Amino acid sequence: MNHVDLLDLPNKNPATVVAFEPDFVLRQKIGNDVVLKDVFTPERIESCQKIIEESRDAFFAEAEREMRLLLQEIEKKPESQEEADRLFENVFARVSDIKGQVEIFGFVLMRNICGHILQSCCSEHEPPGTRYMLIKDLVQVLHLSIREMVVDEGGMTGQAMVSDLGKYRARVEYKK
């Protein structure tokens, strides 16, 4: 199967369709007489790109609201093991939802931060107080990445955040 460069995404300019021949199973499903360059017109591609961008903007607005609620919830340190368990379960549920969305958009940095939070919520190796502090800090890092729309580990901000996150995680694990 040959590939098609439908858009030069950084510049959002339609590019030339090189060739696209779907495999036989797909060809059977769509029909032998369908010409994909007629389906993937520059207008349709631009329309789809606009929908993706609108969805992305809506994600950041909704995620910012969700993060404010999560930050409020995690502000008070749990007093008992039961409170800690309940808090970790709530954080896990909220962050799982966010992680699913960032995976759809391909936001690598946010996905990795969410993964660290989820791992920390499930960890039984640290005492609840240590887990709480780690999760609280990681939630603040996630909030920062959402607020600043840092979607990838590239760039100076993303690289600095990943580097600091790795150092912090190592420091917490070393203190055990």
Image (cartoon, helix red, strand yellow):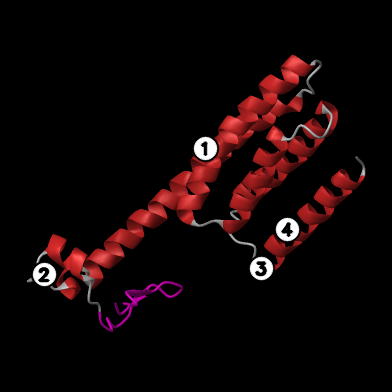
Question: Where does the N terminus fall, quadrant-wise?
Answer: bottom left
Q: Is residue 49 magenta?
A: no
Q: Nearer the viewer, residue 106 or 62?
A: 106
Residue at image position (78%, 18%) is 81
Tell me residue 158's x, y (percent): 68, 61
Alpha-carbon span between mark 3 and mark 4? 11 Å
Q: To which residue does mark 1 refer?
A: 97
Question: Where does the C terminus fall, quadrant-wise?
Answer: top right
Is 26 situated left or right of 34 in this image?
right
* Dots 2, 1 in contact, CB < 8 A: no
- Secondary structure beneath disc 4? helix
Q: Main secondary structure of the magenta part?
A: loop
- Secondary structure beneath disc 3? helix
- Mark whose residue sits in front, 3 or 2: 2
Location of residue 77 with respect to 115 vertically, above or below: above
Instruction: Give the label on residue 162, or none.
Output: 4
Amino acid residing under circle 1: Asp
* Dots 3, 4 in contact, CB < 8 A: no
Location of residue 76 with respect to 96 vertically, above or below: above
Occupied quadrant, residue 130: top right
Tell me residue 117's x, y (percent): 68, 41
Amino acid residing under circle 2: Val
Tell me residue 168's x, y (percent): 83, 50
Q: To which residue does mark 2 refer?
A: 34
Is 55 situated left or right of 121 in this image?
left
- Secondary structure beneath disc 1? helix
- Mark whose residue sits in front, 3 or 4: 4
Along the polypeptide, which appears first: circle 2 or circle 1?
2
- Secondary structure beneath disc 2? loop
**How packed is label 1: few (under 14 Cα within 10 Å), some, or many (20 or more)?**
few
- Mark whose residue sits in front, 1 or 3: 1
